[in-house]
Image (tube, rainbow, N blue to C red):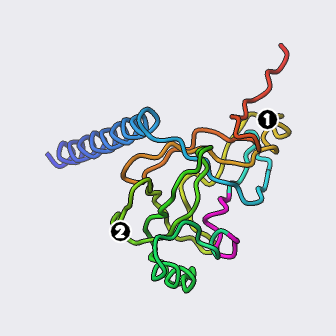
Amino acid sequence: MKNNLKAIVVLVNLVLVLAYLNWSVVQKEDILEEGELVLLKLAPVDPRSLMQGDYMRLSYAISQPNNQLWQEQQNVDSLINQVQQQQLTMDSLESRGYAVIKLDAQQVAQLVRYQPEKEPLHKDELLLKYTKGDWALNLGAESYFFEEGQAKTFEQAEYGGLRVDKQGNSVLVGLYDKNRKLLKPKKTGD
């Protein structure tokens, strides 16, 4: 009887885990399908090598506390917001919150402000969820994996392309060059 109860508990937990994973996949697919393309300027990147292939550590310019974008706080709606944003430091931010951005004509994100809640949100502003790390804010995917031998192609990356939904959830869809063109791996010979 005791073994049957343990088996049932394990089975229920397994079903719950699988249900959560499936829900997560469906949610990401919805973001890919319906989310708006947002290009985030990359801060200096750090290509590294792994045993299973190559990857690039991503760092977004708007998530760097000492970055000029952070300091200038473009597109702020009022003088009060400008004063508040100048006083903003990494320490003053909540551990989770939202980067409020506006897109320029080329879909490149311009930082407006950081805020702890979804509101206020003005016309033409988008939310992008963040979590606070030790040195910067994490805005989603912080690394990009690519096939071994493709480092030269992806070293040209100047933007990270994310699909972002209305709730601020994002999925990294690729890396883009200085002309905002999607970087694609070079085909290797047979």
Residue sitting farthest toward the top: 190
In the rendered structure, find residue 102 and report the number of the disc placed on it: none
Q: How many marks?
A: 2
Q: Residue at x 52, y 66 (%)?
A: 112
In the image, residue 95 above or below residue 54: below
The local crowd at label 2, few if under 14, some if 14 to 19, many if 20 or more residues have their Cα within 10 Å, is some
User: Which residue is under mark 1?
Assistant: 148
- Magenta segment main secondary structure: loop
* SS at mark 1 in the image: loop
User: Which residue is under mark 2?
Assistant: 117
The part of the chain drawn in magenta is: 59-68
Q: Amino acid at mark 2?
A: Glu
* SS at mark 2 in the image: loop
Is residue 60 on the magenta stretch? Answer: yes
Q: Earlier in the sequence, mark 2 or mark 1?
A: 2
Is residue 65 on the magenta stretch? Answer: yes
Picture quadrant of residue 71? bottom right
Asked whether, in this view, residue 155 is left or right of residue 5, the answer is right
In the image, residue 118 above or below residue 140: below
In the image, residue 129 above or below residue 82: above
Image coords of residue 32 (percent x, y): 47, 36
Q: Amino acid at mark 1?
A: Glu
Q: Residue at x 56, y 63 (%)?
A: 111
Q: Residue at x 39, y 56 (%)?
A: 123
Closer to the camera in the image, 77 or 188: 77
Of badges 2 and 1, the one in the foreground is: 2
Image coords of residue 46 (percent x, y): 78, 56
Image coords of residue 117 (percent x, y): 35, 68
On-image quarter of the N terminus? top left
